[in-house]
Image (cartoon, rainbow, N blue to C red):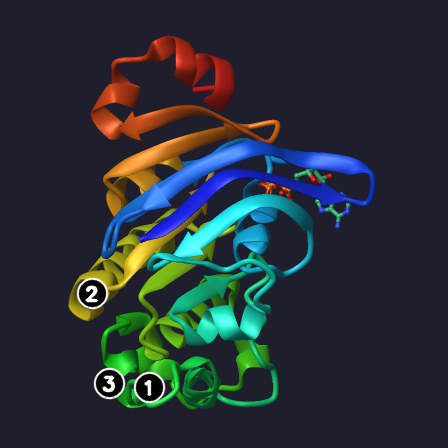
């Protein structure tokens, strides 16, 4: 279980997150949705101790993470796929995915890159192509595949659908859900695409100007037009 309790985050003197609390049960799939600048990326970076200064608690599997550095959080089973994907341009798709061995927990064998590629149909024909020659959608698939290959217990995807064509978004939703189900990984997803978030998760939090303003399942969001209009502009 990931637990975020009363988390505040700061860049310099400006406070970005204001007492955010949320939880992701083991194997659960949860979305954090909110507009541009709401604080989604800051929240994910704070969970990984990868940038912002924070107050409050992040605990994982019953242990408070405190000031534990990012790489140790990764080795405990937390995997972040950042907004900008960070694909290595000069090595192939297969080699990018093989890099996941550096994020696997000690003593845990990462998944075989070719087996992972089979789970992502879009990657099969391009497994030998250099990362620098991929489209945005292909890069996103590689980033997700690389994260899954390390066998994380919780995969955090930061706005994976940004800039992707609708057909790719549909394929990505299928692949993300099946990869999580097959490996038992949980998912914490940041999104503005409500269709995609709904395909991938059971529950959501809405974040607005660094505060959680709604928490519930998708049915309860549907029943709450006021919240949708106010925070999601739909
Ligand atoms: N490195 C930084 N230094 C100072 N302020 C920052 C920094 N990164 C983000 N911010 C500010 O923090 C706020 C939240 O930004 P954040 O990137 O977390 O939002 P987001 O919800 O991920 O938005 P988007 O959907 O556009 O990715 C914004 O007002 C942004 O300008
Ligand atoms: Mg962001």
Alpha carbon separation for disc pair 1 and 2: 14 Å
Mark 3 or 2, nearer chain start = 3
Residue 82 image position (x, y, % from top left): 54, 60
Alpha carbon separation for disc pair 1 and 3: 11 Å
Disc 3 element: helix
Seen in the image, is 109 located left or right of residue 133?
Answer: left
**Is residue 32 shown above or below 160?**
above
**Foreground: disc 1 or disc 3:** 1
Mark 1 or 2, nearer chain start = 1
From the viewer's side, name the closer residue of 50 and 165.
50
Mark 1 or 3, nearer chain start = 1
Judging by the rendered image, the residue that carries numbered circle 3 is: 115
Disc 1 element: loop
Residue 97 image position (x, y, % from top left): 42, 83
Disc 2 element: loop
Judging by the rendered image, the residue that carries numbered circle 2 is: 184
């Amino acid at each position: 279980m990931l637990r975020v309790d009363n988390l505040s985050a700061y860049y310099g003197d400006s406070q970005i997150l204001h007492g955010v609390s949320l939880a992701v049960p083991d194997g659960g799939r949860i979305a954090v949705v909110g507009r541009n600048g709401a604080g989604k990326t800051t929240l994910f970076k704070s969970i990984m101790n990868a940038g912002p200064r924070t107050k409050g608690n992040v605990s994982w599997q019953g242990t408070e993470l405190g000031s534990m550095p990012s790489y140790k959080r990764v080795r405990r089973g937390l995997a972040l796929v950042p907004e900008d994907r960070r694909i290595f341009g000069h090595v192939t798709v297969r080699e990018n995915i093989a890099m996941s061995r550096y994020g696997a927990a000690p003593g845990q064998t990462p998944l075989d890159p070719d087996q992972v590629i089979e789970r992502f149909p879009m990657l099969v024909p391009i497994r030998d192509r250099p990362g620098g020659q991929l489209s945005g959608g292909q890069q996103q698939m590689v980033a997700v595949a690389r994260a899954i290959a390390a066998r994380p217990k919780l995969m955090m995807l930061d706005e994976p659908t940004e800039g992707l064509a609708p057909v790719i978004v549909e394929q990505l939703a299928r692949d993300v859900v099946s990869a999580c189900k097959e490996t038992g990984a949980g998912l914490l997803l940041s999104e503005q695409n409500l269709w995609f978030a709904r395909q991938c998760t059971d529950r959501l939090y809405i974040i607005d100007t660094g505060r959680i303003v709604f928490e519930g399942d998708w049915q309860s969001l549907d029943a709450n037009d006021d919240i949708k209009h106010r925070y999601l502009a739909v």
